[in-house]
Amino acid sequence: MLRTALACLLLAVPAAQAAADPAAAIEYRQSAYTVMVWNWAPLGAMVRGRTPWDQAEFTRRAQRVATLAPMLLEGFPPGSDKGADTDAKGEIWSNYADFSAKMQAFERESAALAQVAAGGDEAATRAQFGKTAETCKACHDAYKAD
């Protein structure tokens, strides 16, 4: 019982910190996206033929993307549209239901990408990468200032 209470307390601290400090939320999400891009860019390079296809490496990085994807939405708590430099558009918070739906679509497609990649079928992996990339683009087009 004490262990459960402690775990709940530890999980609540980052959320409370983000609500109290928008700059911390912005730093969190920018850090998460940095790690995401670190793993996503090599996938795109393989799909586009800029680097040799390596199914094992693709699978490893796709699994990382799938692990990171559910962590992204928590980096956008109310009030974190200001407090530090950010490319996040204010429309995220005025249309949060749509933003959340787009983020959840990315989560689903990322999980599917990891699963398909683990199956070892290069053509299917490439196709699923395209579906996953579409969810990225949909969110960026609507909610990221470039």
Image (cartoon, rainbow, N blue to C red):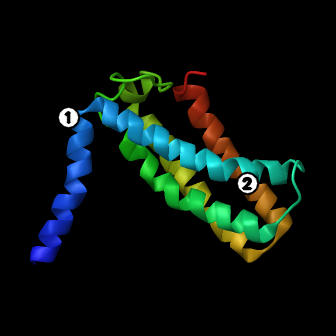
Q: Position of residue 91 (x, y in %)?
A: 44, 23
Q: Residue at x 86, y 61 (%)?
A: 53
Considering every residue shown, the one lying at the far left of the view is: 2
What SS does tag 1 mark?
A: helix
Point out the image quarter for the N terminus: bottom left
Query: Relative to residue 12, is residue 56 drawn left or right?
Result: right
Residue 111 showing in the rendered view:
no
Contact (Cβ within 8 Å) of mark 1 with mark 2: no
Q: Position of residue 7 (x, y in %)?
A: 20, 67
Point out the image quarter for the C terminus: top right
**Between disc 1 and disc 2, whose residue precedes?**
1
Q: Residue at x 70, y 67 (%)?
A: 59
Image label count: 2
Using a 10 Å C-alpha cutoff, classify the residue at mark 2 as few (fewer than 14 neighbours), some (14 to 19) or many (20 or more): many
Q: Position of residue 103 (x, y in %)?
A: 50, 45
Query: Relative to residue 118, is residue 122 drawn left or right?
Result: right
Residue 9 showing in the rendered view:
yes
What SS does tag 2 mark?
A: helix
Q: Residue at x 54, y 27 (%)?
A: 144
Q: Please give the label number shown on residue 9.
A: none
Instruction: Please name whichever residue, 24 or 15, is drawn nearer the observer in this view of the structure.
Output: 24
User: How far is disc 1 from disc 2 in space, using C-alphas?
Assistant: 37 Å
Q: Position of residue 83 (x, y in %)?
A: 33, 23
Residue that badge 2 annotates: 129
- Residue 124 lies in quadrant: bottom right
Query: Relative to residue 144, is residue 75 drawn left or right?
Result: left
Using a 10 Å C-alpha cutoff, classify the residue at mark 1 as few (fewer than 14 neighbours), some (14 to 19) or many (20 or more): some
Give the amino acid at mark 2: Phe
Residue that badge 1 annotates: 20
Give the amino acid at mark 1: Ala
